[in-house]
Image (cartoon, coloured by chain):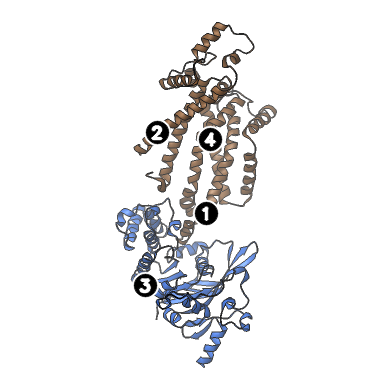
Chain colours: A brown, B blue
Amino acid sequence: MTRFVLRRVLAAIPIGLIVTLGVFALVFAMPGDPLRELAGDKPIPAAVLAAKRAQFHLDDPFIVQYLLSMKDILTGHFGSTFAGADIADQLRLRIPVTLKLATLSLALQWIAGLLFGLYAGFRRNGVIDRMLLLSTLVVLAVPGLVLYFAGQYVFGVQLKWLPVSGVADGYPISYLLPAVCIAITGFAGMARLTRTSIVDTANADFVKTGRAKGLGEQRILWRHVLPNALLPVVTLMGIDFAGIFAGAVLAESIFNLPGLGQFMFQAIKLKEGGVVVLLSTLAFLMFILINLLVDIVYGAIDPRVRNV
Amino acid sequence: MTTGEVLLKVDNLSVEFDTPHGSVRAVDGVSWQVRAGETLAILGESGSGKSVSTQALTGILEMPPGRIVSGSAEYRGVDLIAMPVKERRKIVGDRITMVFQDSLSALNPVQSVGTQIAECYRVHRGLSKQDAMKRAAEMLDQVRIPAAAKRVRDYPHEFSGGMRQRVMLAMALALDPDVLIADEPTTALDVTVQAQILELIEELQAERDMGVVLITHDLGVVADVADNVVVMYAGHVVERAATAEALDYPVHPYTEGLLGSMPSAELKGQELPTIPGTPPSLRAIPSGCAFRTRCPHAIDDCALEVPKLLTVAPGRDAACIRRTTISAKEAV
C-alpha cells in the first residue's frame, strides 16, 4: 500500500511539471499587455510601468518566468497580484468559498444521480426511468454556460427565489443556485451510468446463481447486484470530484462568488501567469490526491484490482 | 436399474418466449423424472430447450419474456411450478440446487468464495457467520480444493477454471441437496479437468444418494456417467432410454445421427459423418416431426402431426412414427 501510494506520487511529479509548463505557456501566448489592461484607459508613468515589469519579471524570457513562478510556489512565497493584493491572503479567503460550493454541488449531484439512477435501474422501462432518460438527454445537450445564465435569470432575476449573485446572504443560500446549476450538469451522466450499470449487472450470471441458491430478490439486489453495479459509479464520482474546479471557474464568475474559480478567471483575463500556474498547481494536486483516493477505495471494493 | 424414490418428476412442461415477432415455443411437452442415486442426462444441441426446461421449473428463468404454458414439475409429489415463489425458494437452493457452465461469471466477483458458499448456510439454515464460514471451508475440502481453510477467503478470479467449478459444486452441495441440476458443468473446461469434475460429481452423488440431472451436448459425457438419457430436439423429447441401450440401439433417427457423427478410432482417416442441414429456428419449426427435414427415413406422413412419444420397449420411448410403428409391429 505505501509503495503503491509512493509510486503514484512520484509518477505525478513529471506530469505536474508538464501540466504547469503547458498552462504557463498558454497564458504567455495570450495577446495583449497585462499591465496596460490593469490600468484601463489611464496613462501609466513609464517609471511605474518599468518597476512593475521588473517586479513581475515580465521582460525575462518565457522559461525564466516559468521557473521563477515555480520557485515562488514551491518555497511558499506567493507574492502579490498585479493589482497589489497579497496572494496568500487571497487563498485564505477564497479556498473556503470554493470548498463550500464544491461540497454542496457534489452532494446534490451525487445524491440526485444515485437516487434517480438506482430507482430507474430497479424499475427499468417504468415512468421514472423514461422521464429520467429524456431529461438527462436534454441536460446533456444544453451547454453548462447556457444553464448557468438561464438559472440565474429565471430563479434569481425573475422569480427572485434566490440571490442573483454574491455571497451577501451567506452559506448555503448564496451558494444554492450555482451549486444546483453545477449539480444538474453533472447529475445527468451520473444517473445514466448508475442506471445502465444496474441494468447490466441485473442480467449477470451470478444473479441467476443467486436465484438458484434460493435467495430473496432483496438480498440479491443489496448483496450481489449493487456492490458490482457501483464499481463504475465510484470511478465517475472520482472524475466528477476532480473536475469540480472547472465548473467552479464558470459558476463563480457568473454568480460572482469570491472563490478560487473567480480568482482563476480574473487572473487569466489579466494574463497573470504566476497566479494561473499557482491555481493550476493546486487543482492538479487535488486531482492527484482524489485519484489516489479513488484507487484506494476501488481496491477496497473490487478484489480484482488489489495488489496492482 | 435404478429403483430409488422418484425425486423430481417433470410432466408435459411447455415454455414459450415472447418476442417482438410473436411467441416461440422453446420447450414443448417435455416429461422426465429422476430418482435418488440416478444420473439422468438431458442431451441436445444449443437451442433444443434443455437448459430452458430446468430453468423454468426452478423459477430462475426470466419471466417475462419466458412463460410456462403448461405442465408440472413435482418434487416429492409437490408441484414446484404451482407453488408460491417464497415456498419454492425453500426447495430450490436447498433440496434442489444447480451448477452452471461458466463458473467465472456465475460467481459474484467481489465476494470471497467462502462468503458465497456460507450464504447458503446463512439463508437456509440460519447459521452464524463464523459457523457458516467453517462449514464453507469444510465443503471446499470435500470438493478437494487444496488448502481449503486458507482458500476460503480467496476471490473467484484467484482460482483456475477447474477449481472454480469445484467451488460451484461446493456451493451447490453445501446443503446436501436431493437433486443436483448440472447445466453443462464441464463445457468450459479442458478434457482432463472435465473428467476430474465428472468423477467428483459421481463420487459425491454416491455418498449422498442424490439424483443428478446432467444437461449436456456431449455424447461422451453421457456415455461416461449417465444411467438414463433424454434426447431433446427443437424443444421436444425425441427419445428416452437407459444410456447403454440408447447408445447401442438408438431408436430415433436423430439419436442415430448423433451417434454416427461421434469420432472414433474405426473412422480414422475418413470424413466424419454429419447430420445434414442445421437445427430449425424455433420460429420456423417444420410441421409434424421437427426432425423430418434432416431425416434420411422421412416419409410424407411425417409432416402430418407431431409424433407422440411412444413406448417401444420397457423403459424405452421414442417419438418417430417410422420407428415406433415398426417396433410395435415387431412386438406383436
Q: Amino acid at mark 4?
A: Leu
**Mark 4 vs mark 2, CA separation in Å:** 25 Å
Does residue A58 sit above or below B120 in this rendering?
A: above
> Can residue A88 be seen?
yes
Q: Position of residue B70 (x, y in %)?
A: 58, 71
Q: Which mark is residue A9?
A: 2
Q: Position of residue A151 (x, y in %)?
A: 65, 32
Quarter-of-image position of residue B117: bottom left
Q: Nearer the viewer, mark 3 or mark 1?
A: 1
Q: Position of residue B73 (x, y in %)?
A: 51, 71
Chain ID for label 2? A
Does residue B41 sit above or below A255 in this rendering?
A: below
Q: Nearer the viewer, residue B242 or B177?
A: B242
Q: Amino acid at mark 3?
A: Asp
Secondary structure type for disc 4: helix
Chain ID for label 1? A
Residue occupied by mark 4: A106
Q: Nearer the viewer, residue B59 or A203?
A: A203
> Can residue B36 be seen?
no
